[in-house]
Image: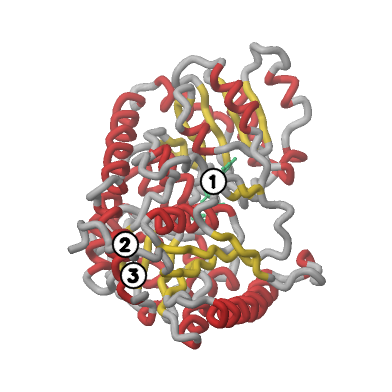
Amino acid sequence: PSSEQPKMHPAKDVNVLVLAHPVQGHINPMLQFSKRLASMGLRVTFLIPMSTEKSLNLVNASSIQVEYISEGLDNVEVDKLSIDEYLEHLRVSVSRSLSDFIQKHQSCQENPAKVLIYDSIYCWALDMAMEHDMHGASFFTQCVVSCIYYLVHQGTVKLPVEAVDGQGRVLSDPPVMSVLGPNDFPSFVVDVDKYPAILKLVLGQFSNFRKAKWLLFNTFTELEEELVNWMGNQWSLMTVGPTIPSVYMDKRLEDDKDYGLSLFEPEAEACLRWLDSKPPRSTVYVSFGSLASLGEDQMEELASGLRSMKSHLLWVVRESEEKKLPRNFMQELGLDDDKKGLVVRWCNQLQVLSHGSVGCFMTYCGWNSTLESLSLGVPMVVMPQWTDQPTNATFIVEVWKVGLRVKANERGVMTAEEIESCVNEIMGGERRKEIRENSLKWKEIAKLAIDKGGSSDKNIQEFVSNVLDLGT
Ligand code: UDX
């Protein structure tokens, strides 16, 4: 039965390979899942397609072996490639390096891996695994609801999406989908002509997924219960999240304080010093993750809203975005110890979200940021940009009720006034209490899910048992 501890093999020599996509929001959950598998007796080799290790800060992943495989971009001018060309190049190069790696692994290991866990957007990795007599586990770094919409778009499943009520909302089964208005679906589905190459990539996740032996999702059952059950009735999916370092969750793994592998250098000390000097729940943490890029107008509105709000500020502005900050913005925040806000290029987000001085997270709703905020009980102000973020944002506000959404005006801009008003409301307005209580409720549920005997823990135990059975 799944709730029992998996059989531990005395030699601890059951290997698995894990293939990640080299983007922070994809590395983190797969790395964390790998560490959990290693703690349960599997020998995990974590593969990252990346020519150089120089830019990586490998902090804490000693329980697994990390290997860099070539993504074949050494002699390529990436800036000159279209997204389509880049993705095709990546597919061809990484599948070649993966195949070479597996061959080498199989020839030199006494007990070579029988399982490849791969990022679901690398659907071709499954064919590669099967060619080498391995089973595949597709790991989804998005939530179930977004995946259902990709499946609908692809025509694999049918929801009565044509049934729309008076407010333009979709009436559907499972009923929770009815919270999504036509613009809340993942952006690649709403505007199919904007990023056709990425649409192809996300739909590709479902091209061969029936051949994967396991479908692993970084979510937890209670969070998307109706959808997990609905999808689980058709395919055998396993929820294994939230994949957040143990020290923040169930404290099961010793010395597991961080994801372990950062593509950016966090200014951790400066953030901690800043937060330590602030009263409880007085600071707004703002970050748009590792990929999003705001337009200059939008950046100006955001800066202006954050300057005028009542709370303290900790804002992550990546180096590539810094030039869009309004001139004098830093001086206006103040330069002495009493200043209103701190701007850094990158932080340790989990450390920040779990700090008592943080009162809310202004986020673009990348799935990892969403799960992290929910699991650490931090209310959100949401400003989704693209991909799965509009869908995540709608669920944050309307289903889990842990945040407020900054509405865009008729020109699609989120104004300074609207930003300031949402932040002030969540930090000190009428909705504050209700939203905070809901956030703390989800924090507890997330902990229970990953803790011993919880829904995700049982699934992970079952997965490990399955893998160990194959390994004998
Ligand atoms: C991408 C997509 O944008 C997202 O929608 C999809 O669901 C996953 O892949 P990314 O842009 O990397 O994600 O954002 P997000 O999913 O939020 O992940 C960012 C990760 O970086 C988080 O785990 C967060 O903890 C970490 N982070 C972010 C930091 O450690 N420091 C920061 O300053 C910002």
- Is 43 displayed left or right of 177 in the figure? right
Looking at the image, which residue is at 52% across and 47% down?
259
Q: Would you name the residue on which mark 3 appears?
A: 468
Secondary structure under badge 3? helix
Is the shortest distance between ligand 1 and the CB of mark 1 under 8 Å?
Answer: no
Which mark is in front, 3 or 2?
A: 2
Q: What element carries label 1?
A: loop
Is 392 situated above or below 144? above
For the residue marked with disc 3, what is the amino acid?
Answer: Leu
Q: In the image as oriented, which residue stretches furthest toward the front?
A: 10
Element type where label 2 sits in the image:
loop
Q: What residue type is labelled 1?
A: Glu
Say which residue appears at 57% left-offset and 35% top-offset: 415
In which image quadrant can residue 216 be found? bottom left
Residue 3 drawn at (x, y percent): 20, 57
| Real-space Cα separation, disc 3 to disc 1, in angstroms | 56 Å
In the picture provided, is 54 more to the left or to the right than 250? right
Q: Which of marks 3 and 1 is nearer the N terminus?
A: 1
Q: Position of residue 128 (x, y in %)?
A: 52, 83
Q: In this view, does 94 lie above or below 332?
A: below
At 56% from the left and 21% from the top, the residue drawn is: 312
Q: Label 1: which residue? A: 410
Of mark 3 and mark 2, the one earlier in the sequence is 2
Which image quadrant is residue 267 in? top right
Tell me how the rendering is colored: secondary structure
